[in-house]
Amino acid sequence: MSITEVKVQNNAKVRRAAISGFFGSALEYYDFIIYGAAAALVFNKVFFPNLAGELGILTAIATFGVAYVARPFGAVFWGHIGDRFGRRIALILTIGTMGGATFALGLLPSYHSIGVAAPILLIILRLLQGISAGGEVPGSSSLTVEHAPDNKRAFYTAFSMSGMQLGMSLGTLVFIPIATLPEDQLLSWGWRLPFLFSGVLTVVAFFLRRNVEETETFKQTRARDAASGIPIVTLVRDHWPATLRVTMCSAINVVGTIFNVFTLSYVSQYGGISGVAMLTVVSVGNIGAAIMAPAVGLLADRFGRRPIYIVGALGSSATLFVLFAAIDDGNLPLVVGSGIVGIGVFYSMAIGSGGAYYAEQFPSKVRYTGMAVGLMLGLLASGFAPTIAQAISSGSHSWQPAVWICVAVALLGTVAALAGPETSRSTTAELG
């Protein structure tokens, strides 16, 4: 086989990996985020009708966070499969788990139908979503980093992050017409439609993922280190500083959950703009981030992962001050503008550069596990940030504590990034 033919074949592999990562992440986070929108808007009435007012909303949003508790366990589980048996098989299984749990949520009876069993089943299915989400982005990022040429790792890996943001956008976008339904229709069948639609998306994503090939890097590592031990044990023993660094950096996702979830509950209680308008802003901001992510990847390949991440982390958290002030003033154009700039530009810089940067902190034999555990521990803070912010604002009616939480995680991530290595100039073989 000629050099040209090898290049064409390798380019085809990395494109398939990037496309699979894009659609797989879009499905996972569509499934994941529609739960957040439903929790903020209807679950308090469907599954917790005996808890009135703010307590019911707080409890419903808390169920959004339980999936983040499951994510680290999912990270260890999928990381073990991905590092021992292959990235591809782990990613196929995560799609099936997430799709099945989400479809089942759409069929779940309400509290009025089966009593306390309804919220219990709700939490169980949410936990399954969390376990699945613990393996998607780390797996697709590891796969793509290992397929990509050294000078374009961030670009190709950013498609997984782009898919993640698109999934979040679609997840909130589908609730815009749903939220306009009469309340009796919304609470009986309307909220179920986005969950049931995920069944179609799951089938499409599954067939796309079947065509992805395992990486040569993994095959060589597996042949060389077949008996090297359990990945999580190796990770804790030899690579805990990198894991801690990824945890600190990935906590920047708090900005995303405050934007995607807390803003919806805030406007539903205190007004300023309508819930439908805020859903639209959330969708537009996430679409902007999805479009920007590949461009961010190119910038991270050109200028390095760390500077792009730091600018994005600090910029996205600072912009939230403008966003919430505009919500209070009812200034919809400024809400839209700050949402696009804060999430579509700055936040996309932090997450778009993070996909490659986190995976590059680890050698191949623990790459999936390392990124998964570090990322999911960081996301644990993200999952409960809306609940904490809701609890604080219930007494003060103020959004400022929520935004200061975002500033704190941005500063934490900045310190962690500055303390770690710049990986953009390293070859794939040198990583970790």
Image: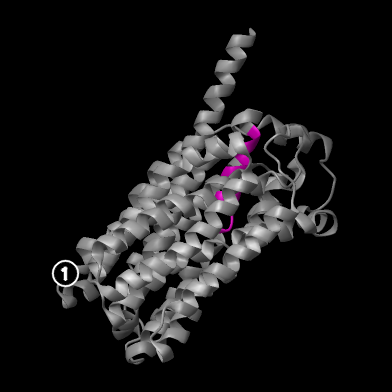
Residue 143 is inside the magenta segment: yes
Residue 101 vs 8, above or below: the answer is: below
Q: 102 and 428: which one is in front?
A: 428
Q: Quadrant of the N terminus?
A: top right
- Residue type at mark 1? Leu
| Quarter of the figure with residue 52 | bottom left
Where does residue 351 sit, x and y in percent of width and height?
A: 53, 51
**Can you name the residue that lies furthest to the left here?**
182
Left or right: 301 in relation to 159: right
Left or right? Give the position of 375 relative to 333.
right
Question: Which residue is nearer to you in this view: 193 or 19?
Answer: 19
Say what secondary structure mark 1 lies in: loop
Give the prevailing secondary structure in the magenta stretch: helix
Q: Which stretch is magenta?
A: 133-146
242 in relation to 409, above or below: above
Q: Position of residue 410 (x, y in %)?
A: 58, 63
The residue that disc 1 covers is 181
Residue 370 in view, yes or no: yes
Q: Residues within 10 Å of mark 1 (few under 14, many from 20)?
A: few
